[in-house]
Structures are given as structure tokens and as C-alpha cells.
Amino acid sequence: MIEKQTNKLKILNDPIYGFITIPNALIYDLIEHPYFQRLRRVSQMGLSYLVYPGAHHTRFHHAIGSMYLMQNAIRILRFKGVEISLDEENAVYIAILLHDIGHGPFSHALEKSIVTGVTHESISLKFMVALNEEFKGKLALAITIFKDEYHRKFLHQLIASQLDMDRLDYLKRDSFYTGVAEGNINSERILTMLNVKDDTLMVEEKGIYSVEKFIVARRLMYWQAYLHKAGLGAEKLMEKVLVRANELTLKGVELPASKAFKYFLKNQINEDNFTNETLKTFSRLDDYDVFSSIKEWISNDDFILSTLSENLINRKLPKVKLQSQPLSLTQINKVKNKVKTSLNLSDNEVDYFVYSGEIFNQAYDSTKNNIQILYKNGKIKDITEASDHLNIQALSKPVYKYYFCYPKK
Amino acid sequence: MIEKQTNKLKILNDPIYGFITIPNALIYDLIEHPYFQRLRRVSQMGLSYLVYPGAHHTRFHHAIGSMYLMQNAIRILRFKGVEISLDEENAVYIAILLHDIGHGPFSHALEKSIVTGVTHESISLKFMVALNEEFKGKLALAITIFKDEYHRKFLHQLIASQLDMDRLDYLKRDSFYTGVAEGNINSERILTMLNVKDDTLMVEEKGIYSVEKFIVARRLMYWQAYLHKAGLGAEKLMEKVLVRANELTLKGVELPASKAFKYFLKNQINEDNFTNETLKTFSRLDDYDVFSSIKEWISNDDFILSTLSENLINRKLPKVKLQSQPLSLTQINKVKNKVKTSLNLSDNEVDYFVYSGEIFNQAYDSTKNNIQILYKNGKIKDITEASDHLNIQALSKPVYKYYFCYPKK
Amino acid sequence: MIEKQTNKLKILNDPIYGFITIPNALIYDLIEHPYFQRLRRVSQMGLSYLVYPGAHHTRFHHAIGSMYLMQNAIRILRFKGVEISLDEENAVYIAILLHDIGHGPFSHALEKSIVTGVTHESISLKFMVALNEEFKGKLALAITIFKDEYHRKFLHQLIASQLDMDRLDYLKRDSFYTGVAEGNINSERILTMLNVKDDTLMVEEKGIYSVEKFIVARRLMYWQAYLHKAGLGAEKLMEKVLVRANELTLKGVELPASKAFKYFLKNQINEDNFTNETLKTFSRLDDYDVFSSIKEWISNDDFILSTLSENLINRKLPKVKLQSQPLSLTQINKVKNKVKTSLNLSDNEVDYFVYSGEIFNQAYDSTKNNIQILYKNGKIKDITEASDHLNIQALSKPVYKYYFCYPKK
Amino acid sequence: MIEKQTNKLKILNDPIYGFITIPNALIYDLIEHPYFQRLRRVSQMGLSYLVYPGAHHTRFHHAIGSMYLMQNAIRILRFKGVEISLDEENAVYIAILLHDIGHGPFSHALEKSIVTGVTHESISLKFMVALNEEFKGKLALAITIFKDEYHRKFLHQLIASQLDMDRLDYLKRDSFYTGVAEGNINSERILTMLNVKDDTLMVEEKGIYSVEKFIVARRLMYWQAYLHKAGLGAEKLMEKVLVRANELTLKGVELPASKAFKYFLKNQINEDNFTNETLKTFSRLDDYDVFSSIKEWISNDDFILSTLSENLINRKLPKVKLQSQPLSLTQINKVKNKVKTSLNLSDNEVDYFVYSGEIFNQAYDSTKNNIQILYKNGKIKDITEASDHLNIQALSKPVYKYYFCYPKK
């Protein structure tokens, strides 16, 4: 709820943090801008609500929450004597608010199916540049920091690192809305432990156990929520729907869809052909375009498109096997042949129903942007060395799992 | 998350109650039915998320939560010696699960604009009857109880009364997701106080203060959340969009919309012409149909439709005055004239931009289905008499407020 | 946990508010002073833990929590343009921290039995004066505000009024530790609604429903927690123990007790004979003195003292009747006679086992220090007029109840 | 709050779990017994409240909470088809309720100072045997299970193992009351994952990440709460007070103390001379005896006793160094000499003010009673093997730290 009190205090209700204050008029105008309001219509966790019915929170809410944590981080760092100018403060608020503005429908669905040539980070930057023009250069420092071109590295690290405000908010928020209580982290306590030395973000010595628990919670959320078997099946199913729709469109079939959605179904967008018009069109694209189209496609003539669409809408999710070793080709082909026969499909077509792949998660990456522990005596250690017995080095090995999807009988 | 454990225990994660167990296979099949899955795509609080960014929870989640409270109520009543048969138990689970299945997009948007001839309660019943046929009569007792035609009244009262599982869940849930913490009620404690005498639901003596607080919380949620000024403006704006779209469609204009949505824009549905086909079509209609259409209408030729649609999508909400007395016609006309001139509108057209009306709330209705207090000595009193000094009688007077909406400059 | 971070940030963990920061060195020194540390050994809710096993929180914790709310109140008022000097800020922190420092063992046990001649408010002031001397006048403004002799009335109102930081903390804290969830209030939201006009504390218009709910929660906590039947029985039992011990001591019996406790058992202290030595002795008196003595008295020769002591320690609480009308003398005497015979007691002695009295609660007092509502147009109304239908006027009538205690068989 | 509802449902309010139901009359009578009521006067976390002001919860509350978790565990295991008789059920409730009844004042203070010859586990058993006699053999099966002499091992494992109800409650409860939110564990979820195979307690495959997080939380609570530097200092200070008092008493000095406390100061109790009278005396000993005596000792003639006592009561805690290597004797002696001179102490006496030692924690012990993971295919693995990358093996190495305490200037 954005309310003005004596025209000064604008506050929003947040079920997690209580009240969030909008720090100034520029931030308020950015939040009210249609580019940012679009995030209200982009699900933060994609289709995870098919598994965790509470997980309907949006990119909008996460971006605002990250900004709230940033406000606390700035306050705490200043309290500890770290000098941060008003311009720098304002810039990190803007940068964290807009860091994910480039996410498309269901956060990742398009990136993995029909807009594979551009990352969401790249689109976020394009939005910032466009807004900077509209707001007459007021976002310039935010962009510099976002691109990590500013000399005070810790400001970028607050936005993008292994302990940034983004992660501190989304782990807490996703844990809250899914009800996976073990993923809950004490963001407030971790913030209290932050410090800066040589313009680099550090965690004070006494924060070691909190960081450990943060990394373990992140790992748990990956396997229990983000990469949950049924949720993974839903996500892959949607990708298959989108790939099929793309394929049919490129063959000349006219599918019902919004204008914005048609634009991306027809044009294979990549970094080179991403124009201002592309950005404008992208800014009108959200979950509603994609899901309402899929609902219409249920009655489409194409058997594959209609079947997959109906499965997604009515939650007839594929059966998913998830294991530490890939299935053998023999096993996969056995299932493929069975499905080909029963559904009367060609070799190409069966790949829409039976497919496999790999997923991976790395709870902590020890090769770049390490979390640094600052000791009272001024010494600095990487968290993997500082933690006495919990082998964070071990946690830094990527974990691979292999999925195999096929229709339930 | 619906997971099977040794094929027996199916549980769902709920951020509010922790874990919810699906009691049996029939309930499981009803939940998996497309009619019920549709509720995943119907916002519980309509457009309130434009004011409270956390309020994206759905009718699906609320229905499951109400069933959870029902499971606890049955357990507690049995513990107190109230005999409830397995058939009765199962019937109230089904009835509470399906009590709101007739809600359309955004819960109330259609009822107040283009499908004004049928209530959502009536549509809920039609769905139950259809499901009863599909499930070969297994919902018969649930329907009898839902219609209040069963001799043991308390079973109906658990589903629909001033202290039913519906209210106990939605107040708690809406308070949770909006972050309006004062609306939080202790549903668990109130359940512990329930009892049955002469087949009528009662609250034990010691529960008086909890009931008082429940009524005050309900009142607070109405004025602070459900009828929040800005949320009311958003809701009224959407009604205006839908009324305009309906008007244009009936004039023969072909607006982009899903097939299901077009059906309701073109046909004026009421109790008399509500066929099986109508129900099937309704079952495919949800927030996505409505919102994606409104997004497309932004680029429509009709000035009114496109302007209102753009205002809704980009959250340019009308200015709302809310007061205890209606505005005078003179005041209203003054604003209408100003807007007519500035937007170049006719007398009829200006009503899409400037309008007024009344809302009301009655925290407790003392004229029907009163909450009964059961004393240790066996005596029974109405809560309005039992509560010593908090004048619940006073709370039972309907409160009227008058709104007036007009465009922000 | 009081920890120093880079010697600047001293924080304490609070289960309710998260982290509490000690604002400056003077406050830190006051907290570390033995006078204040004593509050760690004084139960906030007396013997209520015999009914609510979680309610073991102390006066120490409550005082710190009230100071935390005061810090937020000051920040919010300044944000709204209310000018508050650094000296005033510091003074209200001190005043709220020390407002209850005069509470004796179990908060109220002595006041109602053996130190009836001096109120705890009066003793609080004596402590402040003593500390002011020790800290060389640095508490002078705090004392002026505490005594309501400062020209800016709202500063006193933040410490002592119907919506002060004391109440906002204790209702929330007592609700939290007892688990009586309905008593929970949204202190944070209420603070957000505070404002000051003409140096008087006000609640902004939109806070009306929150204030209503605050008053209803207060009423509920009184009847459900503070005046809970079994808790009341425990409290009265302890008073009887103390009165008997006092009586025996004055007769010359030497009871085992700490030196400090003996001082108060032997001397009938009132305002006139309360010396510096009295204050020093009082500062050494806490729950441990009283409870460990009562444990020793179980093996005392006096039948009444030993029986009552054993009953209290082993939670053999009296039977308590609580009703809206006093019992008739005939009824009371009937029970007295029975107990006299069965325990072989004299007329005077039976009053230690069978007794009656009245308790009362007034959720809101409309006769003094009313809560003022400030409207956007600058008008001011008393909350009893502002609240549309919840008859707060009705809530302002004192509610009397009558208890009658006698031994369980 | 223990209340009877229609004489059947006895419930207690718990701030953590909501409501706890007392399952039957025998359990109710055990809870009301003075032996069990004594636990209301024994602090669960010793003196930790000097560091975490919220941590005033008691052994009483923890025992009741553990029983609540046991009720849930039994319900879940039965739901999964594990057969548990009514007698077995009742026995594990009794066993978990009484498992810690042998704890003395401040939970561990005596064990480490003046009653070093008997463990609290041994005293718990003595209490159970005494109660079994009083309740005519009704505790026999509980005792058999407690002693791990029953053939169905999982019943003992629910009471005492690396994933027992004791740990699941105390970690959650201590985290709650201290406010160290990272120590919070999802006991409810872990219970949902329990199963039994071959009469051995198992965790189902999907519970691996929850168990990991449980172990990491336990480790964190040790270093951040139980072995917190300042808390450790307070605990050691109290041990020194008790050792000194013991020493003086054995020399013939008559110190003020309760009868029960004097008994243990005068007699060196061990397994061999622990009589029925010892048990009875122990049953009268709690925090109040110890703390009220220490308060009196502040004015004792013995310089060491009075100084240490005053330091403890007024929270003048020793300075504590905590590090991964022991301090050298040279360093220690340097400080000792300084303190000897400044306080004018002999060689023996200085050890009361300057001392060192080691503490250790083992988050998971892989050598006995391992946590077993049960796979869907029926295979079983130790958690150290099952966890893919979090090296639980590493966590199972004991961590040693070395403390060094000396007076603050």
C-alpha cells in the first residue's frame, strides 16, 4: 500500500519486513513507471505455485524487498563509519530496484525457449539505459555501479555477489511464500555483520556461522523448491509448449496470441536485432500474455500443441525421474518407442513428450567473488578457509542431477 | 506441494498452517479436477495486490485452507463427544472445499459488471451438481448440507455462518498476505472453543473475548483492506472497463478476447439461460482471460476503452473520496463538467470517468444466524448479550460510506 | 546479548523486535547499573507462569523493549517534522527505561501485602533521583518529563498515557510469552500513526481501527491473562503467605529470610520513613529473596504459614469463583465454617484460606488523558467520538468482577 | 494454562506450538507432582539470560514441549503403518516428560562444581524409579524404554538419539527465546520425514536436506548461544562461587543457605551415598536456593566469596578469550601475577579469578547411533554417506576451543 503521510512518508506493507519506506521522489516515480509496474505481472518463481500453492509472489515485490534490505545495509555500514555519499546511496537503491527488470514472463520461460539469444541481465541494462534517458541522466551512477565500473567495488557487491541484497531477499521471500521454512534465513542478522575494508564488502568474524547457514539454506532451497521434481516437470512442459508454438508460427501457422507475444513468436530476437521497438514490445509482455495464449491453444488443431497446453493448464504434469546419473539411451529409447506407438507420433514429435537433461546447483562458488571474513585484528580470510569444520569448499563443488520426463499413463 | 508418502500421506505446504493433509482419494481427485484447478488462476482479493503487493493468493489456496480448518474442527468436536459419522465428515470437507468454486475472474469483477444475473453461490452449486454426476453421486450429502437441507444444522453452520471455516480462513489468510497484521485472528483458539448443542454450533463461555476480537478484526479488514480507498478505485475502474467492453460488444464491435470471455461479453447470462455449455465455458474463464484482454484493449480505437484499460494496467488509479455522507449532486456535476470539457466527452461518456456510489459493512449481523455462547451451566446466550461491555449490538449496525471517483490530473 | 561492534554499535537480541541498539554510553551505563540489573530478577507478570508456562519474562526485558519502541517513535515523529532536540530524545529514553524500576518482587506482590504504604511509581522516582545524583545531574530532564513538569506534554505522554510505549510493549510482550495470540498488537503500525499537534500526542485518522483493536486487545489480555482465574488464585495465595509472615515477624517470630527481606518484614515502610537505607535495601530485594524464603517456610512450625507456603510452591492453588456479582455473606460463611472445622482454625485464621474481593478493569478511560484523533483537515476528536460504531464509550465503563477463593478438597 | 474442557480436554498455551494437549490423567498427575513442578524453577539455559535477556524459559516448559513433539511423532508413524500399542505410546510420553527431571539448579551448575559424582541422567532415573513406586508400577515400561532395554529400539531413539524429541524441542525453543533466529529448525517437517524399519528409527530420503540443516543449526546454536563467550564467563564464574562456598563449608564456615542447599554443600554426594533422603532433598533444590544464597554471600567476610558473588549478581562478568589454541603457560602466569598483586592473593586464591580450560562441540557423532536415511527402494544409508556434498563427516569431528578468563579492570 503506497500511502502518503503529510506528503513525506510513503510506505508499503510487506508481510515479511512489516513496513517499507520509499526513500525519495525519484524512486517513487521509477516504481510507478509502466516498465516497473509490469513486474507485478511476472511470477517470481515461475510455475512453482503448481507445487507450492502459496508461491504467487512477483518480481515487483522482490525488487521492492531487495531495496528495503539495501536501505538497512547502507544504514548499518554508515553506523560503522563507512562513508557513503547521498548520490551513491541513491544509486544503489536504483540499481537494486531495477536489477531484475529484464525478466520476461514466468521469470525464465522465454529465455529457455524462444528468446534464447539475449539474457535477462542484458535486457535489464537496456531498460535502465532507456529510463536514464527518460529521467535525464539521473540513473547514470546506478548504471555505472550495476556494470561494475565504479571504483568502490562494495557498492556493486551489494547488488551482485554471493551475499547481495538480491539473494538475501529472494531466499527469505521464497521460503516464506512456499512455506519451506528451512530455507528461511536471518537477513537482518547477516546485514548486521557486514562491513567494508579497502572498498570491498566483508563479513565480520562473528558472522561465520550465519554465512554457513545461509549457504546451506540456499542449497536446500535449490533442491527442495527451485528444482523440485514436479516443479521442474511443469517448467519443462511450458518450455515444450513455447518451442512448439514457435515452431508452428515460423512455419506460418497463425496462433492466437497478444500482439506483443506474437512479435517474439515470429521474430528470433538476439543481441544484434534487439531494437528500441523490441524493448517497448518486451515491456508489454508478461505472464498474462503467455498463459492466456496457452489456454486458447488447448483447442488448437495441432495435436502436440493442444495436448501439451491442456496438460499444463490442468496440471497433468509429466512423470519426472531425478537421479545422480543420466539414464542410458537404451532406457530412454524404450520409453520413447512406447509413447510413439501409444500416441502415434513421429521420431521428432516424440521429443515433445519424452525428454531428458541435466540440472545443477552450486551452493557457493569459491572461484570468483568469494565471501571474505574480516577478523577483529584486521586479517581477512575467504569463508572456505575461515569456517572451521563445515567444509564449505565441499559445498562449492557443483552438484549435477539428471532428469527424465515422460507422460503419466 | 502434493507428495505421496508410502502412498498414504498426501501433504501440502502452507505458509500459514505448516502442512495440510489431503484426507482421502475422493478429495484428492476433486482437487485435481480442472474445475478446481481453475481456482489457482482466480485472485482471492481481486485487485487488492495493487495496494498490498503481497496479496497474490488465490481461491485455490483459500479453499484448501478452509478444508484444513474443517479437519481441525471435526477433530475437536469429536474430542468433546459430538458424534459425527465418516460420511458426514467427508461431506463437510467436500462442501467447504467447493463452497467458492463458482467465483469468476478476480473473485467479484464479473458479478458486478457483465454477469449480473447469477450469483457466485448459485454457480458454486451448479459446479457441485455437475461434479456429483461425474463422481456418481458421491457428493450428494455434501450438496444437501451446503443447501442447509440436512437435519444437523451445525454441519451447515461450519460451512456458512458468521463463524464458519470460510471466514476463519480468509481473515487469517488475507491478513497474512496483505501484511495488515491487526486483521490476524487466532483461528486455532476459536476452533478450540467450538461446541455443539441441540445440533447447533456454539462457542463456549471462555471464547467470548476471542469472538469479540474476531468481529473487531473483521471490521478492521473491511475498512483497511477489502474496502481500502485505492483498492476500491481499482475495482471500480475494472468494472468500468468491463461494462464498456460489454457495451461495445453488444453494439457489434469485435474486441480481442479469449473464446470463453467473448461468450460472456456477447451473451447476457442469467439464471434462466445458464446451460451446461455456459458452465463449461465458465469453467475455462479466469483472471488470465480478463487481464490479457484488457492489455490488448489499450490499443483499441475506442477512446474510453483504451484509456480506462491503460489506466488499469499501468496503475493510474482514479482519485477516490470516501466519506460518511454522499457528495451533493452540485459537487459531482461540477467535476463532471470539468472532465467532460477536458476529455471532450458526452454526458453518457463522462460516467465512465466520474462516478459515485455507496459501500457498506456490517461486522456482525444480529438478525440471523447469531453466534451463540454456551455457558458451563448449559445456558445459551447470543454473543450480543453475553459480551459484558463491548457493545457488539453497536457493531451490528451496518456502516455505510460513500465514494466518489474521478481522474487524477 | 550486548556486544560491541567496532566499539560503536551495541546490540541486544530480542525475540520480538529482532535487534535492539543501545543508543549511547550513558544509557549503557544505566543498564549496567546494579539498580537496573535487579530487574532481571523481577518477573514481569508475577506468578502468571503458573498458568502460562512461557511467561517467565522480566521487568528488565520489558524496560529495554519500551526503550526500543521509543527510539522508533522519535524517528517517526522527526520524519513528520516534529522537532525533538537531542537532549529531549535522550531524556525520554532514560525516562522510559527507568519508568518501572521501582517494582518489587513479582512486580506487585509486596505492594499488596507488606509494603502497602508506598507505590512502585514513587519508588521509581526515588531511584531516578538517586541515579541522577550518581550520574551528576544527567537525568534531570528525564525526571522533569517523568513528573510531567515539562512544557512539551507529548514527551510525557510517550512515557505515561493510554497509548504510551510502556503499554505498547507490555501488551505485545505478554501476549508473545503467554502464547495468548489474540492479545498481540501491531505496535509498529500504531507508532507509524502517531503525530504531534500543539505539543500533544495524536493518532492520525487512518489509525482509528488500529487503536480500537489495541483497546480490545488490552481488555482481552486483562481477562484472559492478567486476571485469569487460576493466576489470580496464585497471586492472592502469595499475598496471604506474605501477610502471615509479616504478622508472625511483628509478633517476634524469627523467620528464615534474606537480610533485605527481613528489613521489610520487620519495618512497616511508608512514604515518611523511606530513607536512603530503605532504597539501598529495596535495591537488593527481588523474586529470589521472596521465593526462596517461602520454600524454607514450608517446614515452619506455624501451620498456616507452612500450609500456604507448601500450596504455593507445589502449585496447589485455591479454587477460585469469578463472577459478575459478589457472593452473599451466607454463602461465604457456609464455606468458612466448613473449612474452620476441617482444618481446625479460629475465626481469624480461616481468613487465610477463605476470602473474597473485587477486581476491575477499564479498557479505556475516557475521563483523562484521552487518545486524540487528528484528521487530515487539522480537526481533532476524542477516539470515543471518532470511532463510528464500535462503542468505545462503552468500553470505557469499568468492568467489575468478584472473586471467592477457598481450598480445593 | 491447564484448563479442563468438559472434563476431557486439558490444554496448555505454548508460544511456539500453539496449544499442547495433556493426553491422559496419569500424565496430568505426573505433571502436577512436586518433583515435576520443581522444573518450573530450573532455568533451561542456565545463566544465558545474562547474554540473551529473553532466555528465561525453564526445564518444565521444555519437557512439556518434547512431549508435544512425541505426540506428533507417534501420530505420524502410525499414519505410515508403524504399529505402536497404547501402552508403548503412553510409556514414551512418560519417558520423554521425565528424561531431564534430574537436572539441578541452572541445569548444569552443580554437576560441574559440588555434585560432581552423579550425572543428571542418573538422577533422572532415580526420580523415575521413585515415581514408579508411588504410582504403583505404571512407569515400568517407560523406565525399560528409557534404559534402552526394550526390544523395539526406535522407541528409545525417539527419547535419546541424535534426532530425538529432546533435541528437536530444545533447539527450536532455545532459538525462539534467545532470538538467535538462525538456530530455528523445522521440527514439524523433520517429524513428517520419520519412519521405522526393522524397529529402527529412519529418516526418509527427501528429508536429507532438512537433517543437514538441523545439524548445521545445532552447531550454530552451540557456538552462538550455549558456548557464547560472555555466557561461558558467567557460567564459569558461578562454578567458582560454588566451589568456594563448598570449600569454606567443608572448612567449617557456616554460610547462609537453604536447608536443601546446605545438605549438598556439606556432603560430598556420589553414586554410592545417594540415598532416598538425598533424592528428597534434591527435589527441593532449585535456582532460587542457589541464587538467593549467592546474593547473601555478597556481604560475607571471605573476600573471594563476596567478590565473586557480587560480580555474578551485578553482572560484572570476567573477560573471556576464546581461541582455537590454548594460551601458553607464560601468558597465563603473566596475568595471574598481575592479578595476585593487585588483589593481594595467594597462589591458590588467584585461581578463583584467573583460569583457563577447553570446551568442545560435535555437531554430529558418526561413531554411534547414526542417523539412518531410508530410500524409496528400501535401501538404508548413514546420513554421512547420503548427503551428496555437504561433508557431514567433516561436521562429525569434534571442535575444540580454549577459553581464558580473568577480571576486567
Image: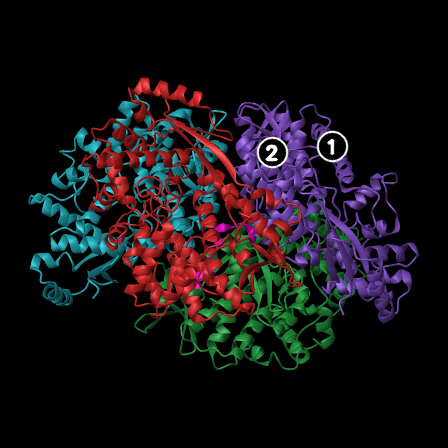
Chain colours: A red, B cyan, C green, D purple
Q: Tell which of A361 and D16 is nearer to you.
A: A361
Q: Can you see residue B377?
A: no
Q: Tell which of B220 and C27 is nearer to you.
A: C27
Q: Amino acid at mark 2?
A: Asn
Taking the image as shown, residue D200 lies to the left or right of residue C380, namely right
Which quadrant would residue C8 be assigned to in this image?
Answer: bottom right
Which quadrant would residue A347 be assigned to in this image?
Answer: top left
- Say if the magenta span includes residue B128: no
User: What stretch of residues is rendered in magenta?
Assistant: C177-190
Q: Can you see residue A117?
A: yes
Question: Can you tell which mark lies on residue D132?
Answer: 1
Question: Can you tell which mark lies on residue D24?
Answer: 2
Q: What is the x, y in percent for residue C336?
A: 64, 50
Q: CA distance from mark 1 to mark 2?
A: 17 Å
Q: What is the x, y in percent for residue C264?
A: 73, 67
Q: What is the x, y in percent for residue C251?
A: 78, 64
Q: In the rendered view, would you say A212 is above or below A21? A: above
Magenta stretch, main secondary structure class: helix
Among numbered discs 1 and 2, the one appearing first in the sequence: 2
Q: In the rendered view, would you say C26 is above or below D35? A: below
Q: Are marks 1 and 2 on the same chain?
A: yes
Q: Secondary structure at mark 2?
A: loop
Read off the chain for label 1.
Answer: D
Q: Tell which of A80 and A278 is nearer to you.
A: A278
Q: What is the x, y in percent for residue D68?
A: 59, 38
Name, please, the residue furthest toward the front.
A272
